[in-house]
Image (tube, helix red, strand yellow):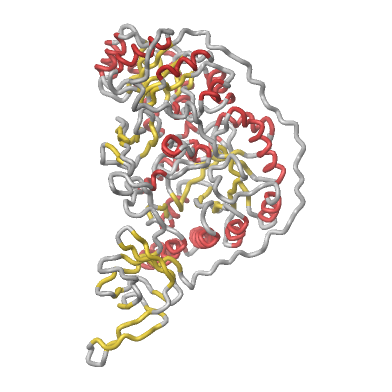
Amino acid sequence: MKKIELLLPAGNEECLRAAVHNGADAVYLGLQNFNARRSADNFGTHNIFNAIDFCHKRKVKVYVTFNTLVKPNEIEEVLNQINLAHSAGADAVIIQDPCLIPLIKANFSQLPIHLSTQATTTNSYSVPDGVERVILARELSMEEIKLISDNGKKQGYETEVFVHGALCLSYSGQCLFSSMVGGRSGNRGRCAQPCRKIYNNKYLLSTMDLCLLSKIPDIIATGTASLKIEGRMRTPLYVGTVAKIYRKYIDAYYASEFKVFIEDKVSFEREVEKDIDELMLAFNREFTTGFAFNDSIVDTRKPMNRGLFIGVIKNERIKLKKALKIGDGIAIWKDDKVIGFTVSKIKIIAKSKDDNVGEAINIHEASEGETIQIDTKGAGDGCPVYKTSSVDMKLELGDEIPLTKPKIIDRKLIIPIIPKRENEDEVKLFCKVYDKKSAIDADKEKADIIYYDILKNDCSDVKKLIKNSKFFVYTPRILSDKQLNEIIEKLKLIKPDGVLVGNRGLLKAIKENKAIKENMPEYGYGNLHLDYSFNCFNDIDVNYYVNEHGCIPIISPELNFSEISALKNKNFIVLVHGNIVLMTTTQRLKAPELVDEEGRNFKVRQTHSNPCIYEILNSQQIGLFNKSLDCLKQGIKYFYMDTNKDVDKFIRIYRKILNGEQFDDTKIKKGYTTGHFSRGVE
């Protein structure tokens, strides 16, 4: 039986050595650009050849990350970077944008491609042709992982799942929070982690760390090929510790005595607890088993490393939950402060023969259950104490990485010439609405297309009321295989004029479904629109969706006006007004809005999907108003509005602007944002 792969992060050379020495089957690492951890040390021409040669001589594979979105002017640069990785002997590249697959295959036909978790793969329809592996969304259940893994064995691809490390609150690849609020895009590897900030006076969005050590048998049983550890920003000690412990459990699983071991639940749980303690000392923000096991992933306390909880101060003493030695590091949480230091003195209260408390005696080590005195730095009763480091934890890096001579393949790159394609249509307004009244109002104002929620109970009834506009349905961004098939059935029942597709898998399902083609007008150019959840970011993307799939995409709101204008094919849609979704999450959010420390309000919107998906909206709506004319002058003719009120008013305003009539937007644009229209992201 082939063992499941253990895949470790390598943010720098020391982490690489720690991973290899402590049991990694494979590592993943990034070059300086186009990787989702651009703040890590990463690798470059000077050491990528050394690193890959070092790993290969130890039978460890190396996957190089290109898991960010690529701007229109960066296509040649990213191909040159892939050529560097390929020349160095990379075993695969990891990418976010599935539209780049044909381009990579045209230039590097034998180079395996892994689709990043940034691609938000939540169903088997979403796995594109040409990938050897897909890294699944962290939100999937064991049953969903098994379904996609089983399908992969038939279709010729593997799956990979995260089992340990930091979590994103939002589905990866569907987060614009850092981008819109802080100007640093997670889709470009520069996330500023706004989820670690305070909202409603708590850290409401701060996630715990994933730890699935005790679930290894369940995960292996799904048929997935690889267990992935997050942590390219972590220390070598973290990488080495996690590698060593997960290696132990994987090897044990395949040993003949493992079944007997796990059936002895007491011994198994005791062993797991001991190893989780060590993982906590390496790094944790509390551990969760995540969405796959219906666990909450949020901890509203401090968004920082915890260490190992050892007790609470009471009467200047601590009854230890875990052992403590001189030289260990501890942190005392006092109000909003964390007091960290190294333990230099431990006193234990000795007992006399008649069991009366005696004098305090200095000791070198105290055991679990004992009551001790240490310098509490003025912290009073009730303050929790954590052990943050242990003198017993040792880091073994193993061999040093020897130098090798770089030899970059001189390759003539195949870069497609994207022809210019004007939009020959009339100027049109597409409006997303949320209730029957808004749909009727939009129809009275002759919106060209109305998008209505396919999951609302009155969807069919609203369709019958629309007289002047085309009636499209919009569909969820997140779909399992089961939910996707349910949407297909609803499409056959409602028979809308078109679809605003939110999920990549649904696009493929619509194209392949014979019943839809037989019972409805064939969905092709003009009646399949793509939500900005598709992250359409460059000429390759637009050309792929428009020319090859007959779709009209809403262009990514992370591109600025100059970048949008430079796109050769003008048959796309620009968001000009209304709400923008910052996060899409499965985590239940009870508050109707989130208020940050600057007083900005971010509304929380529940979808009609089952289970419910929550969307966090930007504190300011997009409002381009007269700036929409700049787009029109560049040949862009499709404009998108996402409005939950006053839709008729804003249709009239934008009709007036786009018709070239004078409109003073000085007052009305106050309180709105133009988003990235002027600034863009790095």
- Residue at (34, 71) in percent of width and height: 377
Quarter of the figure that contains the C terminus: top right
Q: Position of residue 448 (x, y in %)?
A: 38, 11
- Residue at (55, 24) in percent of width and height: 562
Q: Is residue 677 above or below residue 614?
A: above
Q: Position of residue 32 (x, y in %)?
A: 61, 44
Q: Position of residue 284 (x, y in %)?
A: 42, 58
- Residue at (56, 29) in percent of width and height: 99
Residue 271 visible = no
Relative to the observer, which residue lies in front, 472 or 375?
A: 375
Residue 13 visible = yes
- Displayed quadrant of residue 476: top left
Q: Position of residue 257 (x, y in %)?
A: 48, 64
Q: Is residue 302 above or below residue 628?
A: below
- Displayed quadrant of residue 641: top left
Q: Is residue 555 above or below residue 655?
A: below
- Residue at (31, 69) in percent of width and height: 311
Q: Is residue 563 above or below residue 319?
A: above
User: Is 441 on the left-hand or right-hand side of 46?
Assistant: left
